Image (cartoon, grey):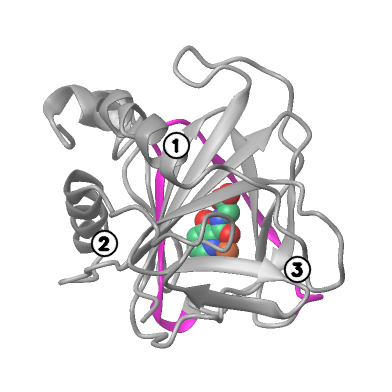
Amino acid sequence: MTGDLFDMLESPRDEQVGPGTCLLHGFVRNSAAEILAALPALLEQAPLRRMMTPGGQPMSVEMSQCGSLGWVSDRDGYRYTRRDPLTGNGWPALPPFWRELAGQAAAAAGYASFVPDACLINRYAVGSRMGLHQDRDERDFTAPIVSVSLGLTAIFQLGGAGRSDAVQRLRLVHGDVLVWGGVDRLRFHGVQAIAPGRHELTGEFRYNLTFRKAG
Ligand code: MD6
Ligand code: FE
């Protein structure tokens, strides 16, 4: 599991990157294979797809969801739904083991009793990116967001409260967990185009899981 002596020697310490934001280096590195092993069954029920932005452009990243609520984007805007618009079925259940890890990461970052009801699954191919945005479709901004990075490395842009504020760049590698909330909860952020590479567990992809309390 996490936080053993080997981990401590291998990885830098937890890094407070903002007043409400903590980068837990390698927090799920030793659980990564197990996390990834749960993916195929989830993606069979709710396939990855490129959603449309409200402006009508396909997003660069392929997405799916699990949990009682799933985030969708289409011509009508952004929102959480109980059903997958692609299949008409409810979203697959959040694996209990994923939920526990998310709660442990939140606690390690100082957010006690985090119980997510939604998990966005993002898959980035080489060259995929995510533009600067705020996460503001959740009902309750007092809960943090727990973001797990797997596979290829990303350069994460952490901006400020305004879209044109300066951005800080964070390198997110396989097994890193970024937890943010509190006064940082509405900061703009994005992901730069993924650089070419290959990871032994994910091939030419990066996966990002973001756990939220949406409802
Ligand atoms: C990503 N993450 O890392 C995209 N949002 O692929 C996000 O958009 C994000 O990592 C809110 C909180 C943490 C995140
Ligand atoms: Fe986001």
What is the span of residues highlighted in magenta in the rendered image?
A: 163-183
Residue at (33% x, 48% y) in the render:
14
Point out which mark residue 166 bears.
3
Query: Upstream in the sequence, badge 1 or badge 2?
Result: 1
Q: How far apart are marks 3 and 2 (CA)?
A: 26 Å
Residue at (52% x, 37% y) in the render:
207
Q: What's the residue type where badge 2 is placed?
A: Ala
Residue 159 visible from this viewpoint: no
Label 1 beta carbon within 8 A of ligand 1: no
From the viewer's side, name the closer residue of 107 and 143.
143
Q: What element carries label 3?
A: loop
Residue 165 in the magenta stretch? The answer is yes
Residue at (39% x, 87% y) in the render:
140
Which residue bears the numbered disc 1? 44
Q: Position of residue 33 (x, y in %)?
A: 31, 23
> Which numbered mark, 3 or 2, is in the foreground of this view?
2
Q: Position of residue 174 (x, y in %)?
A: 45, 30
Q: What's the residue type where badge 3 is placed?
A: Ala
Q: What element carries label 2?
A: helix
